Image (cartoon, grey):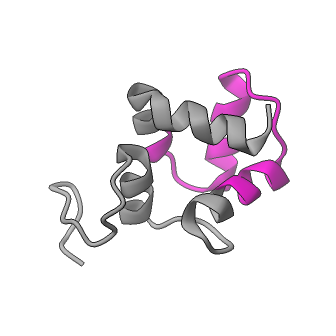
Amino acid sequence: MNIDQILEKLSTDKELAEKYAALKGIDAILAQAKADGFDVTREDVEALLAKISGKAGELSEPELAVVAGGNEDKHKTYPMFPKM
């Protein structure tokens, strides 16, 4: 499964997206992806995060919540996160 297919799956499966949104760091995401049957490497996860965020590196918790919720408003206040 390539990163576009994984991104599509996360955007259409809210429960799965919420599970991934709760993970901390690339290693946790990679372990969960493998447990969920995705055939991915660390580089795949890094590329997916970069594609989602439009930049290299890990997403912050608010950014990941935006992606997981499918909301494009990166400045929206979420009850679980302090206002940015």
Say whether residue 19 is visible.
yes
Residue 45 image offset from top left, x and y in percent: 73, 50
The quadrant in which residue 30 appears is top right
Say whether residue 31 is visible.
no
Quarter of the image containing the N terminus? top right
* 32 is within the stretch colored magenta: yes
Q: Residue at x 63, y 44 (%)?
A: 29
Q: Tell me: 72 left or right of 25.
A: left
Q: Tell me: 48 left or right of 24.
A: right
Q: Which residue lies furthest to the bottom in this view?
A: 84
Tell me if residue 41 comes above or below residue 67 in the rendering: above
Q: Residue at x 63, y 74 (%)?
A: 55
The quadrant in which residue 25 appears is bottom right
Residue 67 image offset from top left, x and y in percent: 44, 53
Choose between 60 and 66: the one closer to the eye.
66
Name the main secondary structure of what is drawn in magenta.
helix
Q: Tell me: 82 left or right of 34.
A: left
Choose between 43 and 23: the one closer to the eye.
43
Residue 64 image offset from top left, x and y in percent: 44, 56
The quadrant in which residue 22 appears is top left
Residue 43 image offset from top left, x and y in percent: 83, 55
Q: What stretch is highlighted in magenta?
A: 20-48
Q: Which residue lies furthest to the left in this view?
A: 79
Q: Tell me: 13 left or right of 84.
A: right
Q: Residue at x 74, y 44 (%)?
A: 3
Tell me if residue 43 comes above or below residue 58 in the rendering: above
* 11 is within the stretch colored magenta: no
Q: Which residue is drawn at 33% across and 53% down?
A: 71
Q: Total number of numbered labels? A: 0
Tell me if residue 48 comes above or below residue 63 in the rendering: above
